[in-house]
Image (cartoon, rainbow, N blue to C red):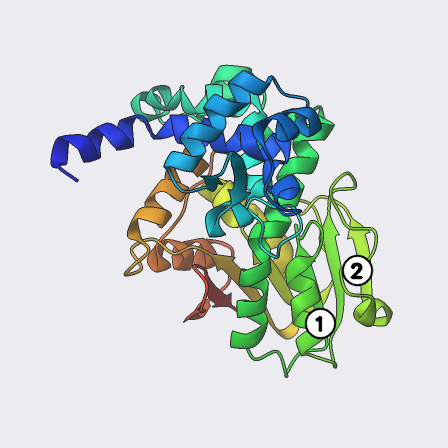
Amino acid sequence: MDTRGGLESMITGYRISAALSVAAELGLSDELAKGPRTVAELATVAGADEETLARLLRALVAIGVYAEADGAVSNTAVGEMLRSDVPGSLRPLARTLQDPALWAAWGHLGHSVRTGENAFEALHGVDVWTHRQHQPEHNEIFNDNMTALSWKIATAVADTYDFSGFHTVVDVGGGKGIVLDAVLRSNDQLVGTVFDQEHVVATEPVSPAVSSRWSAATGDFFKEVPPADVYLLKSILHDWPDDRCVDILRVCARSLNPGGAILVIETILDRPGQEAQAAFSDINMLVMPGGRERTEDQYAALFTAAGLRQTRVIDTPSRMSIVEAR
């Protein structure tokens, strides 16, 4: 691709995002998992206008999401990942774009760059967490997305870190408890709790096999967390500015059992091969929750400010690393 064409594709990339989001919302890949379908058949099932759906599908066929042959449309390997029933499905991620407030916040990026302010709150007058609390449908999609994106990372954490010296673990801000589930399944000696706000936290374990060692608790991690030997904080600190991160870490440090550890599971800036993904995740944090991605040194500074010591950083087979503090 020539330089001009490449830049043009980058500029108009939002069109692809929008098309994928609509396909995910309509559940097209789920229907195509049953076999090839005509546009008319898909339009009937999806409740869409046949002619307009045909135009959408033409675009998605052109970029390899779907295939077309003999008047019927089918999934490709790419389209399969928009199915709701595949491990690590990207359908919830695509569906998050159905929230108009998200699109509008990204359109407000320039304000953040000029002022340093969080784009979402500056535009909408409330932070993204408050917004989702009052939008149950979008909140559920967000939670589904966090669950889907966590599968590979959860397994990587459970396989990479040695939990043998611990007996109790709390998944702080753990939502549906995907990371906790993986850690408990890999460590029979552990008893674990998923801790989050009442409208978010799981009510039962992902795997029934760990139910005897699993519990859920609700609360505010800025105020208190249940005592534990080890805390898991996956994709928590990157949501918040430095001062709020220090508050969270101090609360965890206060309740940490002697000899325990705090494991911050995050994308680390400037890791080879992940530069672009980490950098744009950092911009997403600026636009949406108001946090940021960080370097190893920046995490070490947060721990020091909270009265902790960063002891090591462990890379995992996923895009995230484990930053350990004691």
Residue located beneath label 2 in the image: 205
**Residue 169 visible to an observer of this rendering:** yes
What is the tally of numbered marks visible in this picture? 2
Residue 7 point in image, percent of width and height: 20, 32
Mark 1 is surrounded, within 10 Å at the Cα level, by few (under 14), some (14 to 19) or many (20 or more) other residues, namely many
Residue 187 point in image, percent of width and height: 69, 79
Residue located beneath label 1 in the image: 184
Compared across the picture, whether 137 is left or right of 153 comes to: right
Closer-to-camera residue (133/58)? 58
Q: What residue sits 55% from the left and 62% below the top?
A: 152
**287 over 89 or under it: above or below:** above
Residue 210, label in figure: none
Element at badge 1?
Answer: helix
**Residue 129 visible to an observer of this rendering:** no
**19 over 184 or under it: above or below:** above
**154 over 221 or under it: above or below:** below
Closer-to-camera residue (320/127)? 320
Residue 314 point in image, percent of width and height: 43, 71
Question: Could you tell me if the residues under marks 1 and 2 are in contact, i.e. CB atoms within 8 Å?
Answer: yes
Q: What residue sits 51% from the left and 34% below the top?
A: 71
Amino acid under disc 2: Pro
Q: What residue sits 64% from the left and 50% below the top?
A: 147
Residue 308 point in image, percent of width and height: 50, 63
Furthest residue in direction front, as rendered: 70
